[in-house]
Image (cartoon, grey):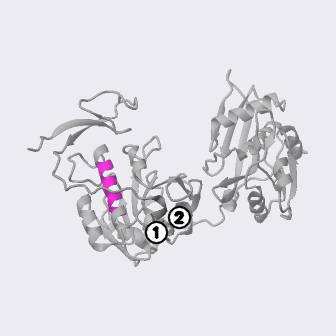
Amino acid sequence: MARAEKNVYRCQACGHKSPKWLGRCPECGEWNTLAEEREAPKRASAPSVFSVPEPLSKIHSAAGGRTSTGMGELDRILGGGVVMGSVVLVGGDPGIGKSTILLQAASKMPGPALYVSAEESAEQIKARAERLGIDEGPIVVLTEISLEHILAEARSLNPAALIVDSIQTVYTEDLSGAPGSVGQVRESAAKLMRFAKTTGVPVFIVGHVTKEGMIAGPRVLEHIVDTVLYFEGHKGQTFRILRAVKNRFGSTNEIGVFEMTDAGLAEVENPSELFLAERPVNVSGSVVAASMEGTRPLLVELQALVSPSTYSVSRRSSLGIDFQRVGMILAVLEKVAGVHLAATDVFLNVVGGLKIEEPALDLAVCASVVSSLREKPVPPETFTFGEIGLSGEVRAVNHAEARLKEASKIGLKKAVIPRGNLEKLKSKACGLEITGVKDVHEAIEALFD
């Protein structure tokens, strides 16, 4: 006899289950995250089919089973195209372009794609498609929130791709909780994963983002899917950055740059020119830095503002760069280079809303801070990159030639780089005046001589 339904409480943050309500989750320690759910009685299931061990040498590789989405930037992030039978989670702030980019990709698929909208009506999808100029594309629209009905239609249609917008608004009949609850989100994602693996149809899932910047629902959702893509940028800005934070079939260092236009998201083939288009000339505190995002060199503008502090404790703030690393560089400047910053407020910003995590930005941070403090601009055609150690040495970074070629392409003339990179350059015919430095003293002299 099947057991009766009972109520349980599940943590919205980590998925921990408790028989009673608690103010604080005993697993992750978060407050007020336990929500009530009703567990349905277990149903009789078919006998399980178990797999058997198989030698690795006899297993056929599935490499090469990729399909282009028709968008070069999206293919770059996915590792060369979408893998058949994979599940891709796309997250981002409301209105940033999640539905737009998936609708554009669906219109360029090699076959009809099934676009499931659990939030908008078919008329709203049609209006957006007309605005994007893709209303004649091979897209099949289904407005449904029942996951069982969605999967039944997908099996009968066998589409080129299945897009579910969004995972928080669909529900499975196997659970009695409301759509968007922890159990519903997790079980729905698991069923979509099983569908993708058994049919070979790639599945794209849209996930909402909370105020803390995480995809709503349990964190286990990110472990279920194969790829997690996050949109970065602000709705008030014209460009968007799509970054892979998890990818079982490719690199997680790649980014795609798009520009929001009246006709949807347009791919930006040369993002360096976009990020430097409005750079002020002969202004102190502004420095061009050469960064790498995966295999793509990217030139960005780093700005610093150093002003006398009006508080007893100096303020430090950074946007787009690790705050702890900025504090380390300021300490090196204070002790090793003799740059006095104790009585000043320091503010740093990577222009354009980018987030740069690699240490090659250290030398640019140093240059921008000194430039703002001394009110002396860095020459507008000069750029720099390099990692700074705690003793003030400037260390070599990878992909130096790619950074130099990208800077030469957009018209920069002078580079200040680590001496270790200069000695290892295979080709110096980039049309650049390259200066190699071994420590922060030499770097400051080379930049402000």
Residue at image coords 34%, 39%: 15
What's under tag 1, amino acid-wise? Ala
Residue 103 in view, yes or no: yes
Residue 119 in view, yes or no: no
Q: Quadrant of the N terminus?
A: top left
Q: Which residues are magenta?
A: 184-196
Q: Which mark is residue 74?
A: 2
Q: Are marks 2 and 1 in contact (CB under 8 Å)?
A: yes
Residue at image coords 28%, 48%: 184
- Find the residue positioned furthest to the right: 449
The mark nearer the N terminus, 2 or 1, is 2
Q: Which mark is residue 218?
A: none
Residue at label 1?
105
Q: Secondary structure at mark 2?
A: helix
Residue at image coords 86%, 52%: 423
Residue 416 painted magenta: no
- On the image, the x and y values in percent for residue 163 come to 37, 63
Q: Between 144 and 386, which is closer to the camera in this rendering?
A: 386
Query: Could you give the CA–CA distance between mark 2 and mark 1, rounded to whole angstroms?
Result: 9 Å
